[in-house]
Amino acid sequence: MPIYLYWGEDDFEIAQAIEKLQNKVLDPSWLQFNYQKLDGDRTEAIIEGLNQAMTPVFGGGGRLTWLADTNLCQQKPADAIIDELKRTLEVIPDTSHLLLTTKKKPDGRLSSTKLFNKYAQVKDFSLIPPWKTDLIANKITEIAREIQLKLTPKAIALLTDSVGNNTRQIWNELAKLKIYRGESDKPLDETDVVGLVLCNTQNSLKLAAAIKDGKADQALGLVTDLINRNEPALKIVATLVGQFRTWTIVKLMEEAGERDNKAISSAAGINNPNRLYFIRKEIYQNTPQQLLSTLPLLLDLEYSLKTGSEALVILQTKIIELCLLF
């Protein structure tokens, strides 16, 4: 049946999927008659959307009704909504397409989610966790294949380190590399990539790891590279704060005897409790006091940047201080 539920935080991938669906379903000449986007978290809009989905197509092409940012699969809907879903979903005509999008994962316990699992094409557009570099590399390979761009394994590895899980930036960087390659059929290697690709939080995460391991030379090299590539200093600090905050909370709770992964994940703001396995390995050799001592230094670093200190100088100074803790 022509019903779709797209969920996840990867806005760029969802936008691409919606564009493909629009191009497939709609006739541009009849767009204003057969396409409607509604606010999916309002009861009246949901009812209107279901009614629109049952309306015959006017003119050429098909009909597309989009309930954006819906909460149908996260909060228990009113009985009237459930009744309307039961009446509508199984009888929507083939020429009419109903799309629902949401950032949050559907709650499988809800009757509304069960209905969509039965009648809809449900697609997960979650961001790849930044620590799962193998999946990021697979994603880069998949997109490169789609745009017919050949890359060597070392080029893919470099892109994985530089770009991380930002799907929009992956597409942008690969499109740039495709233009650079031109008509040549030769695969691009790491020397082609290194001068063209922008860094983002992936290298900021490497910077946090270098600090945690007390590797001052490596940390200073990473921060200089990030600044030279126009990475905003406050964005670097935000990534460091987030990473050290997570490490600190996990270490402190484990030292206090907490063994419930869900409780630790909730306190540390970790969406996936399975990530704790990797975090424990990362901070195995660090003490709670070491990790806790980073937070005042990072707060001072953020304050200095916001009050006008030169970014590279103050970053280098504070990073040396942070490394000395370890």
Image: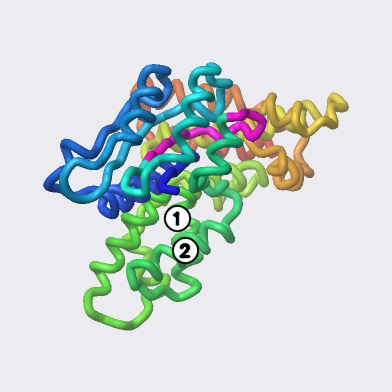
Q: Where is residue 182? Give x, y as percent.
A: 22, 74
Checking the image for residue 162, the label placed there is: 1
SS state under label 2: helix
In the figure, residue 254 lies in which quadrant?
Answer: top right
19 with respect to 106 (left or right)? left
Q: Is residue 210 magenta?
A: no
Q: Which residue is mark 2?
A: 158
Task: Please count the marks in the image.
Answer: 2
Q: Is residue 32 visible?
A: yes
- Tag 2: Cα neighbours inside 10 Å, few (<14), some, or many (≥20)? some
Q: Which residues are magenta?
A: 98-111
Checking the image for residue 108, the label placed there is: none
Near-viewer residue (226 or 128) = 128
Q: Going 50% across and 65% down the picture, which residue do you hit?
A: 157
In the figure, residue 45 lies in which quadrant?
Answer: top left
- Tag 1: Cα neighbours inside 10 Å, few (<14), some, or many (≥20)? many
Q: Which amino acid is tagged 1?
A: Ser
46 with respect to 292 (left or right)? left
Image vertical order of residue 95 relative to residue 114, above or below: below
Q: Which amino acid is tagged 2?
A: Leu
288 with respect to 293 (left or right)? right
In the image, farthest residue toward the right? 257
